[in-house]
Each structure stands twice: as structure tokens, then as C-alpha cells.
Amino acid sequence: MNVTDIAFWIFAAIAVVSGWRVFCTDSMVRASFLLMLSFIAVGLIMVLLNAPYLGIATVFMMAVEMMVMALFMVMYMMNPAGLNPMMMVHQHRFSIAAGVFVFAALTGLIVVTRFSSNPVAPDAEVVVGLGKELLGDSMLIFETAGVTLLATMVASVILSSRSGRFGEADTGAVPPPLEPGGEPAGRQPEQASGHAHHHH
Amino acid sequence: MTPIVLTVAWVAFLLGMAWYIAVLDGLWSAAREGRPPRAPLANPLYRCATMLRQQSNLTEAPDLLNWRLAPALYAGLAGTGVALVPFSGASVLADLEVGIVWWGAVEALTVVVVFLHGWSANSQLGLIGAYRYVAIGLPVMLISMFVLIAAALPAESLAVPKIIESQRELWNVIRQPLGLPLFLLLGLSLSFRGPFNYADSADIAGGTAAEVSGAPRLVWEFARLAMLTAVATVAASVFLGGYLGPWLPGPVWLVLKTAAVLLALVGLSHQLARISPSRMMTLIWTVLLPLSFVHLVWAGVLAL
């Protein structure tokens, strides 16, 4: 048993135990970051398997993804800060059945499949190879499309978030009228040239 | 350098640069307030000793595991960032083929760790700091990703040593002029200083560190300095040619360039005012992120 083997068993244990704890914890924030820990351990196993780009990209993406997920779950679940204890599992019977079935199916696949034993040379340029394999000659097109899509997403969020339920975001909030087409509800803000009101 | 020498150099670099930043901070504050600095060189050490002698505060029902782990993880992430950078052509602690991607993971995990630090104390001010930090930290991270991808283009590699070697003719700071300024903003954000201090600022009584004292506070403050050091070291390597330079040996050049970048970072953090988080969000998404797109297109066209 060499260092790589020992590292594999440690990462494997972390992945399994933290994956199991996701379903035992009572907080959404803890559940998210336990899931992140499980994925990070899997990513490091991929690094051991000489797939450094895929492994570290997994760590990177899971960290961002779980952070955003935890934040939005807490925002939408009305659970202040996600610190209130809450049940993290539901639909018990269906979940148990689905879990057992998927585990059996995947384990069966592992047992049945014949994995190729064709080791890659240690000095092979795996990252370059992966890039060519995934994108080939279309690298430039994919990169351009990726940045364009992100720019489109940002622009559409900025354009659509300007007009809100209570008026345009950059002019200050105005509550809706109580009757259709009427004056805005609530106390009216004083006008900047407020003296005009006193004279009529 | 043998691995043992490299490891010792790595620890000494982190501690020495953290001390250097603390001294610069003290001198800059004194100059701004127009008073003579008191024991500028020893003051950081006195503050360490004070924090070590303090009691570690405890809040009601904290998530103690995450609360105590967060400062250590933050310092550890900073350490792995510095380990990516070669001190000279042949001496690098972590010779990763995908070093830039790991640096991206360091940035992402930093956001997670700072959030956990504020969240797990079970106190309002810490939580406000944590939420504010995530809102600002994530888009700033996006900017730095584009900047780093642009720096990897001329090198045709994601490894930090190859990116340094690609700057033998011309440093990236000249080839891609927007890169370094945008990356320095990331440094202020990752260690939440000055205009980007949305996590631990005075307006929320210290934010994520509001309830932290004693040894955990010392580790947390050290980790902030170590993270700033990591950003400066990566910036010196990716934009200023790292260990490359005439006459002097490589490690000296790296230390000098890192110290210069740190001076700029400390100056920015003392001279720039912080604006409200919502305005900063608008600035990031509508000005800085599009600038990073322009930067990437510029670098791509040059590399073609």
C-alpha cells in the first residue's frame, strides 16, 4: 500500500461519511457544505487518477455551487439564517426505495462492467488532450459563445431588474395604488420644491 | 532547493510578508492621522501577544466545529496559493499542471470559509458580514477568473511556472494592461480590506469577527494577511514575471515584486473609501465585469 492508496482510502471515507451526514444534519447550510465536502473528496480522488483538470474543476465548481445553493435555500425557506433546526428529509418510503434501487443498479453496473486496464503514460499531456477531445477545432467558437452567453445573462438580469413591482430600481420605491390608476398608497414623499403646496 | 528547504522558505515567506503588511498598515495609519508611529516594527508582535493572552469568546449555541475550523482553513487556503508560485526556475512547492484552476478553487473556497466564519458564530452582525461578503465576493471572483484565463492564453498553459516563462520577452502587465488592476481588486476582496471590506468592517462592529477573540482571532487576522500575501505573490508571478529579472537571484526578485504589489494593495486599502454594497454590486456587474470581458477579448486577439 503506497501513499496514493492511503490517500484514496482517506478521500473515499470522507466522501462517503460526509455524503451520509448530509441526510442526518438539521440545517440547510450544514447540509450544503457537507455535500460540498463529499464532492471535494471525489474531486481529489480524480486528481489521484491523473485527471487534474477535471478533479480541481470539480472542487472549484462545487464550492461556488454549494455557496449559492445554501444562500438561496435560506433566502426562500424563511428560516432565519438557516440556524433553526429543521427536518432535512421527506417522502421517506419513496426515498428509501429509490435509494436502494439506484445503489443496487450502480453497484451492479460496477460489477458487470469490464474496465479497461490501459494506463496512461505518467508524462502524457492529459490536460491538453482533454481540451482537444472535448472541443477539438471548435475551441475558439466555444470560448466566444461562452463569454457571449455570460454577457447576455448579466445584461438581461440588469435590464429586467430595473423595473420592479414598486417602480424603477434607480428612482426609489413607490408603493402601488390602492385603486387601479390612483395615487400611490402610503404617505407621499415631500417634493424637492415643497413650498408650492402651502400656497393654494 | 530541496523539499525541506522549500517548505521552510514557504513558511518564512508567509510569516515575513504578514509582518511586513502589518508594519505597512501601522505606518500608513500613523501618517494619515499625522502622528508619529509607535514602535512600528514591534507593534504587530505586541498585538499577537495581546490576542494570545485574551480569553476566547463563546457565543450562545454556535456551530463550534465550523467556527473554530474557519480561521485555520482560511490560512491553509492562503498557504496553498503561495505554494503554487515558484521561487526560481526549479523550485516550486506544488508543481501543478492546472495551478491557475487550483487558484480559482482557493478563491471559491475562501468565499465559503468566510461565510461559515460569520454564520457559525450564531450572531446577527457576523451573519450580516457573511451575507454581504458572499454577494460581493462571488462576482469579484468571476472577474479574476477572466483575468487569469487571459494570462494563461500567451503561455498556452494553466501552470504558473509556464505562465512566468511566457513573460521572458514582455511582462503580462504591459501585454495585458487591464489585468493587474482588476486582479488587485480581487486581493482587496479576498482579504476584505478597504473598499472591499464588506465582511469585517467597522460599520457592523467587526462583522464575521465581531464575536471572535483570543487565539482564534489571532489566526483569523493572520489568515487575512496571509491571503493578501498569496494574492500579491500570484499577481507578481502572473503579471510581473515572478522570479525573472537581471543581476539578482530569482527568489530575491520574487520577494521584491511581491513587496511592491503589497505596498500598492495596502495603499489602495487605506486611500479608497468603501461605498454601499448595492452600489458596489452595480459597479461590479455593469463596469468591472464588462471590462474583464474586453480584457479577455484583447488578450485573445493578441494571442492569435
Image (tube, coloured by chain):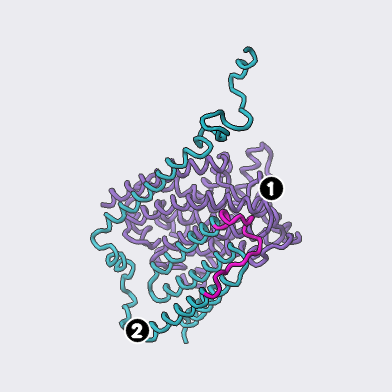
Subunit under mark 1? B
Q: Is residue A83 magenta?
A: yes
The boundaries of the magenta stretch are A73-93
The amino acid type, in three-letter code, at marker 2 is: Thr
- Residue A90 location (% of width, % of height): 56, 69
Q: Is residue B283 magenta?
A: no
Residue topped by disc 2: A113
Estimate the x, y position of residue B76 in percent, counting from the top left: 56, 64
Residue located 55% across and 76% down the image: A17
Q: Residues within 10 Å of mark 1 (few under 14, many from 20)?
A: some
Q: For the residue labelled by badge 2, is the local secondary structure a helix, a strand or a loop? A: loop
Seen in the image, is B41 located left or right of residue A141? right
Q: Chain of mark 2?
A: A
Q: Colour of chain B?
A: purple
Seen at 53% across and 65% down, the residue is B9
Displayed quadrant of residue A34: bottom right
Residue furthest to the left in view is A137
**Which residue is disc 1 drawn over?**
B205
